[in-house]
Image: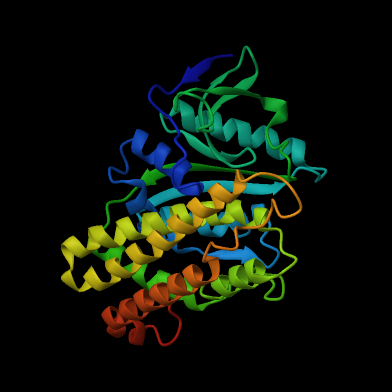
Amino acid sequence: MGSRRLTGLALTRESLSYIDAMHAVLAHCGWFGASKAMLAGMTINGFRFSVDRKLSADSWHAYNWIAEHFLAADFIGVASSQKAGFSFAPTFPLYRKHAVAMIKEAIDNGIGAVFWKDDFVVAAGYDDEAGCLLYADGSGAAPEELKPLPYDEFGCNETPYWYYQTFDARIPLDELEIYRESFMQAIFKWETHDLMLSPSDYACGKQVYEAFIKFLDADDGCHAEARPLLWRYAAAKRDLADYAAELAKIWPDCLPIADCYAGVAERFAQLSAELSASDTGGSGPNADRMNADVPAVPLLREAAELENRAVQLMKSMMRERLHNRFGDISLR
């Protein structure tokens, strides 16, 4: 029986994605000293862009968590361990017991853990006497505010998924190579449909813009459904703009790329602001639809054109490396 709490491990919701939790843990243990925007770019997580064609609010996390989060850590030289599954599986109690033990072990080593509690949250402590994990989800008045989660309730979420990730070791890598690889993976994410997702049900990469446009342009569309996704992706595009701006300080050739992403972020910010305004615009049969004066479709088309231009500029910068991969861009 024991207890442990990692002082100073806090979670703030800014990137509105897994990056918030990953950054909280890695920054706390001293393995990453840059901004969330840099982490989003270096891990490729910020370049992931996918939605289901009904624009369901939870489709932002429709991707292979184990594969992509393993790679996110690997891209920056961090070794990680993770497990995931379904809470309705008959073996779930055994997995839950093991997951709690692994999270506690990480905390004993002074490193927090990421797990799924209806969003990606951070385990920052535990109390055996109370029989609970202590976690931060960024919803409290103070970022360091911790909530208790009884051990027996780990994995009991609104959806039947459970997941955790611990970070085990770090190997220093050449940051310039990390930046170059991030562009390679960004090109792949933009041009390639996620093999895990059905093309008839999901849009990925550059196809996401047309999915948004088709949904928002439909006469029978309920625009309220699109708001959570647009808010999350507005945060992602802002991160990418900041990331590209930082790389432009190193490589002047990145300046046009940074300008493109700044334009994308600006249009998503405008769209998000307009959606927020329409969200408080009253009631009635059209309350869930965007104001007709909001240029949603033109903004999305402009953003799509700018982001495509950014990717083409990346391809120009990375042309030799692209050629050396013989068509398999994602293969390192």
Q: Please say if 42 is above or below 169.
A: below
* Of the pair 163 and 47, the residue shown nearer to us: 47
* Quadrant housing residue 142: top left
The structure residue drawn at horizontal position 60% and vertical position 53%, both measured from the top left corner, is 227
Is any atom of residue 145 visible in this view? yes
Is any atom of residue 254 visible in this view? no
* Of the pair 264 and 299, the residue shown nearer to us: 299
- x, y percent for residue 200: 71, 75
Q: Is residue 283 left or right of residue 101?
A: right
Q: Is residue 255 left or right of residue 42?
A: left
Q: Quadrant of the C terminus?
A: bottom left
Q: Quadrant of the N terminus?
A: top right
Q: Please say if 2 is above or below 160.
A: above
The structure residue drawn at horizontal position 83% and vertical position 43%, both measured from the top left corner, is 90
Q: How is the image coloured?
A: rainbow
The structure residue drawn at horizontal position 31% and vertical position 46%, both measured from the top left corner, is 35
- x, y percent for residue 246: 24, 57
- x, y percent for residue 241: 33, 60
Number of numbered discs on residues = 0
Q: Please say if 245 is above or below 332.
A: above
- x, y percent for residue 290: 61, 58
